[in-house]
Amino acid sequence: MSGFILAIDQGTTSSRAILFDDEMRVVGSGQKEFAQHYPASGWVEHDPEEIWGSVVATVKAALESAGRAGSDVAAIGITNQRETVVIWERATGKPIHNAIVWQDRRTAPLCQKLKKQGLEKTFTKKTGLLLDPYFSGTKIAWMLDKVKGARKRAEKGELLAGTIDSFLIWRLTGGKVHATDATNASRTLVYNIEKNAWDDELLSILRIPAAMLPEVKDCADDYGITERSLFGAEIRILGVAGDQHAATIGQACFEPGMMKSTYGTGCFALLNTGGDLVRSKNRLLTTIAYRLNGKTTYALEGSIFIAGAAVQWLRDGIKVIGKAEQSGVLAASADPTQNVYLVPAFVGLGAPHWDADARGAIFGLTRNSGPAEFARAALESVAYQTRDLLDAMRKDWKGASARTVLRVDGGMVASDWTMQRLADVLDAPVDRPTILETTALGAAWLAGSKAGVWPKANEFAESWALDRRFKPDMEAATRSAKLAGWRDAVRRTLSMQ
């Protein structure tokens, strides 16, 4: 059997396909950006048809760049932007509305209404999540309420709902399979993570018909076979995981106490808690890290909405840099005597604050503050937010020891300055791997191991290789002062005083 494994990485701003060989090396890839739609303030949508087209195109590009055919691929693994959700027609596969993106805040009033009814504890106990527009459930409810005739059609069984992975599986298999994995299901706000099942009470509260939802499978499982007409061969789909969970797997964080953080548009830190379903007392999320062979591994997660997006703001918003790569060099030249803080609450604040109404603010400006100080403040904001998450994790779970090493991935980790400042602020080592395509690698490993052509978890973990370890090099007094300034800036930014 061929050892080539194809990973489909469907992200927030682009779709990618990466082909790995039997030694887990990248041999081909394709990438295609797609449009972001902002129909109202705080609303973010994607065209599902454009996403589908971009996925097909990038798979073909990856195969072509490697000089391979679909028949050379042993299996496909899929990873995706998690909470983004689609509703489509069972008969035709046609979406009834644009996909509502994880960043979208339109359901904030519904979340507030449910909170006032005293229902947040019910949702949190069963799902590990908080009542926030971030998650998929209220997005599904919104579409059922707002798209003409949608609720009646859903109740008749004419409509299906799912996160992007489900939509892609449906399309790839020609409508034969409606499925998702446990990690994506755990982000919907209607999945009981302790019982590993859709929750009838939560579905009733949000008025979502259970028949719309996909079958929930293990991360490494049989998700059907692609239509031959797509890629010239039938290819098995054997792995699925939400992007942050796939990155956790790609970073080989299989042991309790291991932690990874992905720095993309946002920042998502996951701490493996093993079989312990840790209920956070510090407004972190409890989530399913992965489910393999019917065994569930849990994690504590902290979600930061703005990480790499702060660098995009420097480039596209205030135009102090021309390219993202310039941010670290510019930050390094900042005046060390200035203490400028950016709280990047452009779309609210995520963990551990969960303040949907907070908005971005800058503190500590002087007449001498300029582009360098703005760049440093933007990059430091990512480090400070990560420190907030790590502190909360340590309070929640004794397994998050002071000796925790953070494994990092994502576009921002290429900047040595940013990673060194992260280690300094965390007062903990930061490990950057040699393979930065950890999200795609995690999805590929799920499919490859299920297909029997890639190694099992322990051997895969041994193959993880370090590029560089960044060790803390900041004096304790300096760190304490900087953190105090950050916490004061956040306090002044919160809408809920």
Image (tube, rainbow, N blue to C red):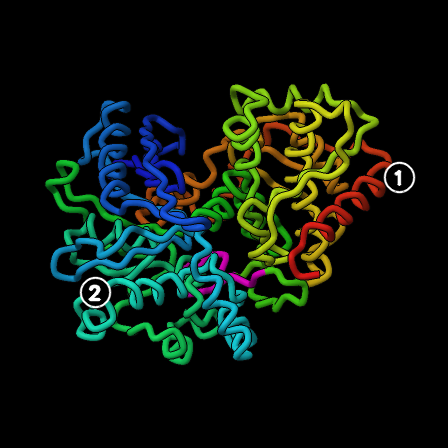
The quarter in which the N terminus is drawn is top left
The answer, for residue 271, to whether it is visible in the render is no
The answer, for residue 407, to whether it is visible in the render is yes
**Residue at the location (53% across, 43% down)?**
266
Most foreground residue, 80 or 382: 382
- Which labelled disc corresponds to residue 477? 1
Could you tell which of marks 2 and 1 lies nearer the N-terminus?
2
Element class at badge 1: helix
Look at the image and say whether residue 279 sits in the magenta stretch: no
Q: Position of residue 175 (x, y in %)?
A: 16, 56
**Dot 2 amino acid type:** Leu
Q: Position of residue 479 (x, y in %)?
A: 82, 39
Neighbor class of circle 2 (other Cα within 10 Å; few <14, some 14-19, many 20+) is many
- Which labelled disc corresponds to residue 159? 2
Element class at badge 2: strand
Left or right: 186 as drawn, with respect to 215: right
**Dot 1 amino acid type:** Ala
- Residue 410 position (above or below residue 494): above
Q: On the image, which quarter does residue 223 sit in?
A: bottom left
- Residue 198 position (above or below residue 458): below
Figure label count: 2
Left or right: 353 as drawn, with respect to 3: right
Most foreground residue, 147 or 400: 147
The part of the chain drawn in magenta is 285-297
Neighbor class of circle 1 (other Cα within 10 Å; few <14, some 14-19, many 20+) is few
**Residue at the location (50% across, 31% down)?**
435
Most foreground residue, 313 or 72: 313
Of tags 2 and 1, the one toward the viewer is 2
Left or right: 10 as drawn, with respect to 287: left
